[in-house]
Image (spheres, grey):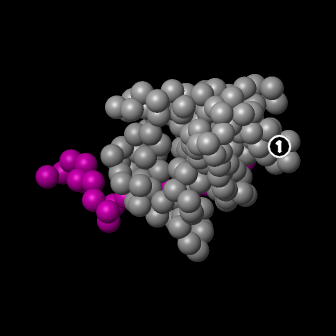
Amino acid sequence: MGGKPEPSPQNHRRVSPSLYTPVHMFVLGIDPGLTTTGYGLVAPGPQAVIAGVVRTSPKTPVAHRLLELYRDLTALVAEHHPTVVAIEQVFSNRNLQTVANVGRASGVAMLVAAQAGLQVHEYTPSSVKRAVAGYGNAPKEQVQKMVAQRLGLADLPRPADAADALAVALCHLQGAALLERVEAAR
């Protein structure tokens, strides 16, 4: 009817992923947990540099587990020199012990980042899913597939905690790049 065309896949232009990636940022994504903390370092491109998990034994006293997590994350930061840390926020759970332990692990990750002079940004699980998969309630499998696709990985990142950490890093890269471009346009 002479107005703007209706949005459809045919009249959407593809946007290069590089438009969403700041050229100077190496993001360490963290999916905190006391038993398993996922980590993933994403470089400009975006490309995965390293991803994995830090595991602590539930049989070990909590204070010693937190110390182990602290040492492992400190070594990771010292070896890879990220420029910023993005952490998945603690979400409400029916199990208060789980929430407390995730909060403790998150605090350790923040301490490691602060000691290294790094900025820390937190993202809710739904904002990470929305940024990576386009839907805030996306299932874990869909998020893993999108992480693999966006990072050009041949296989899905495993374990799930490492994939989640890569997703948190991608979420930060995407948001930071858009903010950077808005600031540059002013």
In the image, farthest residue toward the bottom: 154
Q: Which residue lies under the disc numbered 1?
A: 75
Residue depicted at x 73% and y 58%? 49
Instruction: Pick the residue in front: 14 or 38.
Output: 38
Task: Report the number of discs.
Answer: 1
Provide residue 8's location: percent of width, then percent of height: 27, 59
Residue at the front extreme of this rendering: 59
Whole-percent x and y of residue 98? 47, 34
Q: Nearer the viewer, residue 2 or 62?
A: 62
Q: In the depicted view, which residue is nearer to us: 106 or 171?
A: 106
Query: What residue is shown at x 47% (from left), y 51% (from top)?
Result: 132
Residue 153 is at least partly visible in this image = yes
Q: Position of residue 38 (x, y in %)?
A: 61, 48
Does the magenta portion include 95? Answer: no
Vertically, is 12 above or below 165?
below
Report if residue 24 lies within the magenta region.
yes
Q: Left or right: 94 with respect to 153?
A: left
The answer to whether residue 56 is above or below residue 106 is below
**What amino acid does circle 1 point to?**
Ala
Q: Position of residue 92 (x, y in %)?
A: 39, 29
In-front residue for pair 166/1: 166
Instruction: Please give the range of residues in magenta.
Output: 1-25
- Please tell me which residue is depicted at 69% across the width and 29% down the height of the picture: 63
Is residue 178 among what the camera can see?
no
Left or right of residue 83: residue 4:
left
- Disc 1 is placed on an element classified as helix
Question: What's the magenta bit mostly, secondary-structure-wise?
Answer: loop
